[in-house]
Amino acid sequence: MSETTTSTASTLYDRLGRREGIARISHELIKNHLANPLVQTRFGQIKDMDQTERNVIDFFCAGSGGPNNYAGKDMLNTHRGMNISEQEFVSVIDDAIAALTTCGVEPPVRNEVLGVLWSMKAEVVRV
C-alpha cells in the first residue's frame, strides 16, 4: 500500500489513493453492483455506464476532500422515486466495502467510508 493511503494522510481523499485510487475503487464497485443479484437490474439499466462511473469518481473525489468538483445530481435527487429498499442499500454498502477491500484499503479507512455511506441513507432509501 502506498504512503498516500495510510491513516496519517490528511484527507480521506489521500487515504483512498487520490483520484487514481478512487477510480480503481469506483470501477470495482460498479463491477460488484453489476454482479449483485439484489441491484444488478437497476445498474444494468444504465445507458451510459462510462458517464455514471465518471460521476461516481467525481462524487467520491469531491466528497472525500479532493480538489475535484462534482457537477452531477445530489444523492436525494439521484435516488428520488427509485423506491430503494433498506436491503438494497445495505447490499450496495456491502459491495462498496468489498471494493475497498479488493483495492487494498486498510480497515480504519474502510470504516471511515462506511460511516460516510451510512450517513447518506436518508437521501437514498424510499425517497
Image: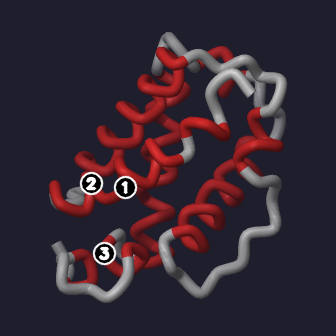
Which residue is labeled 3 in the image?
A: 15
First of labels 1, 3 by sequence position: 3
Residue 32 horizontal/vertical position (percent): 44, 32
Residue at position x 66%, y 15% from top?
A: 41
The quadrant in which residue 121 appears is: top right
The amino acid marked with disc number 1 is Val
Which secondary structure, mark 1?
A: helix
Relative to 5, is 66 on the left or the right? Answer: right
Residue 112 horizontal/vertical position (percent): 31, 59
**Numbered tag placed on residue 113 in the rendering:** 1
Which secondary structure, mark 2?
A: helix
- Characterize the local packing of mark 2: few (<14), some (14-19) or many (20 or more) Cα atoms within 10 angstroms: many
Which secondary structure, mark 3?
A: helix
Which residue is labeled 2 in the image?
A: 110
Residue at position x 70%, y 57% from top?
A: 55
- Mark 2–mark 1 distance (CA, rounded to whole Å): 5 Å
Q: Nearer the viewer, residue 123 or 55?
A: 123
The amino acid marked with disc number 3 is Arg
- Characterize the local packing of mark 3: few (<14), some (14-19) or many (20 or more) Cα atoms within 10 angstroms: many
- Mark 1–mark 3 distance (CA, rounded to whole Å): 10 Å
**Label pair 2/1, CB-CB below 8 angstroms:** yes
Residue 86 horizontal/vertical position (percent): 52, 19
Residue 51 horizontal/vertical position (percent): 76, 53
